[in-house]
Amino acid sequence: MPTTSAAVSNLGALDAAHHLHPFSDMGKLNAAGTRIIERAEGCHIYDNHGKRYLDGFAGLWCVNIGYGRREIADAVMRQMNELPYYNTFFGTTTPPTVLLAQKIVSHAGPNINRVFFTGSGSEANDTWLRMARVYWAAVGKPSKKMVIARRNGYHGSTIAGASLGGMKYMHEQGDLPIAGIVHIGEPYWYGEGGDLSPAAFGLKAARELEQMIDELGEDNVAAFVAEPIQGAGGVIVPPEAYWPEIARICKARNILLVMDEVICGFGRTGNWFGFQHFGVEPDLAPIAKGLSSGYLPIGGVMVSDRVGDVLVNEVGDFNHGFTYSGHPVCAAAALENLRIIDEEGLVERVRNDIGPYFAAGLQSLEDHPMVGETQSVGLMGAVQLAESKATRGRFEDRERAGVEVRNHCLANGLVLRATADRMLFSPPLIITRDEVDTMIRTTRAALDAVWAEAKG
Ligand code: PXG
């Protein structure tokens, strides 16, 4: 039975009247009208006019197994009928919650054996921040409270998440960041590397962490947090030297390393987790998105034994948790999602087959006059727009360049995201070679059109 725009003809007007969208200028959006997405299958979404789009962005970096998987719907239905809700407070748990925790850590390496569940990635970031401070207090270093994060990092929209994140336009609203959170630069060679080689710049960017620790005093710093590959900030793949140097500094200076796996986790990079791609190990790792492929909201924090053993053996009550921590239906959806990723070998597929194919497609765009560089790991990629590629010259209006390319893609049935002058790709892990070809071809056509307009 149709329940959406087929049945309700004025959904657009109702949306404008009653629905406040995230990260939107509602005045402008109401005037322009929203796109209403009604259904989806595989790697495609369909709007209420029946127009089909290839979803190069997996919803919002999350629909790793693609749309329309009956197995998830069936697992959710079974769990709904069996036990739609129970909490994990007051000494109780539910079967899918336990099994999910075990399944997650089975992919995380020998030193990560526990998970704390949340409803989202933002809550996961709030959670590790409290956990890190509790950890340091428990080991007799209560002054270690501050967190060093990165400019243009993204860690969510709650007060802690937005503070940990390094988005200036978020900090400008609501007096952020909160006290105790400071930011260092991002390893963005194309934009900020100047005359340095990528390798030298990678080391320099990592060593900003050391300088900041010196400035704040090692005894005041609890943790450093970053995404393995910065997502919303532009799919910034750091130079190779970056992460090993960051890990070295955290170890030498005794601060917790927190790697935000909300986007990179669950196969996106061709490994189960982004930290495995870079060969480093976090002490804490927030997760969400691909954990359930977005079918239902669920997140969590993966906890290493270093922190977990202290939490379990020394802290006593950790006074933190959410009504929906470990929600049984969300956990059932996530469990089925991880079973699919496992049994269909999607992580290996990204690493050995479709990831390299996608990388070659992106690289084929590098001959375009408007492309400054491409970067990708697995099925996470970026095309850097350039005004003059020989000098890594940027468009004067960077936002506009990206928006125009994005709009051309949309008009031609491809969803991509633009972060200023970088076009971001994050398709479902099941994307076919044909669909990758379509994505690259449509992007090239958009670049041609926008370049022709700009150089007219
Ligand atoms: N960490 C990272 C690395 C994320 O990408 C969050 C935490 C927060 O998760 P929740 O579930 O609270 O949204 C995210 C979310 C974008 C965009 O425009 C990215 C996210 C969310 C919304 C928009 O790229 N990432």
Image: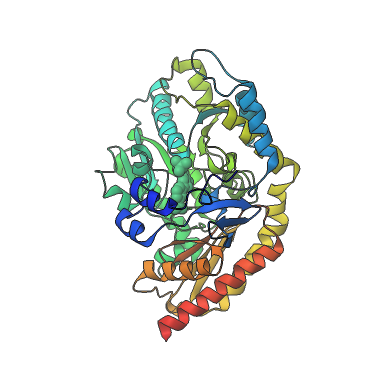
Residue 203 on image: x %, y %: 46, 56
Name the residue nearer the viewer: 13 or 405.
Answer: 13
Residue 422 on image: x %, y %: 46, 65
Residue 13 on image: x %, y %: 38, 53
Q: Residue furthest left?
A: 175
User: Could you say which quadrant of the image residue 391 lies in?
Assistant: bottom left
Height in image: 43 above or below 130?
below
Q: How many marks?
A: 0
Q: How is the image coloured?
A: rainbow
User: Could you say which quadrant of the image residue 327 lies in?
Assistant: top right
Name the residue nearer the viewer: 291 or 328.
Answer: 328
Position of the N terminus, as image quadrant, is: top right
Q: Residue furthest top?
A: 91
Height in image: 195 above or below 32?
below
Q: Residue furthest bottom?
A: 456
Q: Residue at (58%, 73%) from the top-left corner?
A: 365
Name the residue nearer the viewer: 285 or 382.
Answer: 382
Height in image: 7 above or below 120?
below
Q: Residue at (74%, 45%) from the top-left corner?
A: 344
Can the viewer see residue 269?
no
Lateral position of residue 63 relative to residue 137, left or right: right
Position of the C terminus, as image quadrant, is: bottom left
Q: Residue at (42%, 44%) from the top-left corner?
A: 155
Can the viewer see residue 221?
yes
Name the residue nearer the viewer: 228 or 314.
Answer: 228
Height in image: 222 above or below 170?
above
Residue 366 on image: x %, y %: 56, 74
